[in-house]
Image: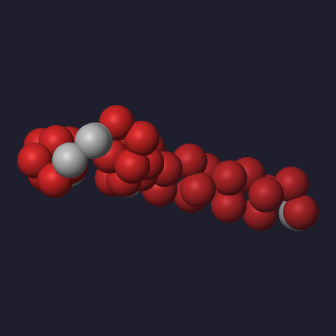
Amino acid sequence: METFWFVVLAAMFAVYVVLDGFDFGAGIVHLLVAKNERQRRITL
């Protein structure tokens, strides 16, 4: 039963990351790549 709940939680987390992946990626990348306000707006 513990394995079942672990698989359910892992699947839910994986689906969340896949569906929200663009937001996470854009949020992290804009801090590293964008040099000015215009580039930040383009990235986001």
Residue, x 16% and y 53% (percent of image)? 37
Q: Residue furthest right?
A: 2
Left or right of 26, for residue 16: right
Question: 43 left or right of 9?
Answer: left
Q: Is residue 16 visible?
A: yes
How many numbered discs, if any? 0
For residue 22, say whether it is visible. Answer: no
Residue at the extreme front of the image, as rendered: 36
In front of the other: 23 or 29:
29
Q: Where is residue 44 in the image (x, y as percent from the top left)?
A: 20, 50
- Looking at the picture, tell me which residue is in the foreground, 6 or 28: 28
Quadrant (top left, top right, bottom left, bottom right) of the N terminus: bottom right
Relative to 29, residue 11 above or below: below
Residue 9 locus on image (x, y percent): 68, 61
* Residue drawn where x is 10% and y is 47% of the image: 38
Residue displayed at 77% across by 63% down: 5
Where residue 13 appears, as percent x and y from the top left, is 58, 56
Q: Residue 12 appears in which quarter of the rendering?
A: bottom right
Residue 17 rendering spot, x and y as whole percentages: 49, 50
Name which residue lies at 89% across and 63% down: 2
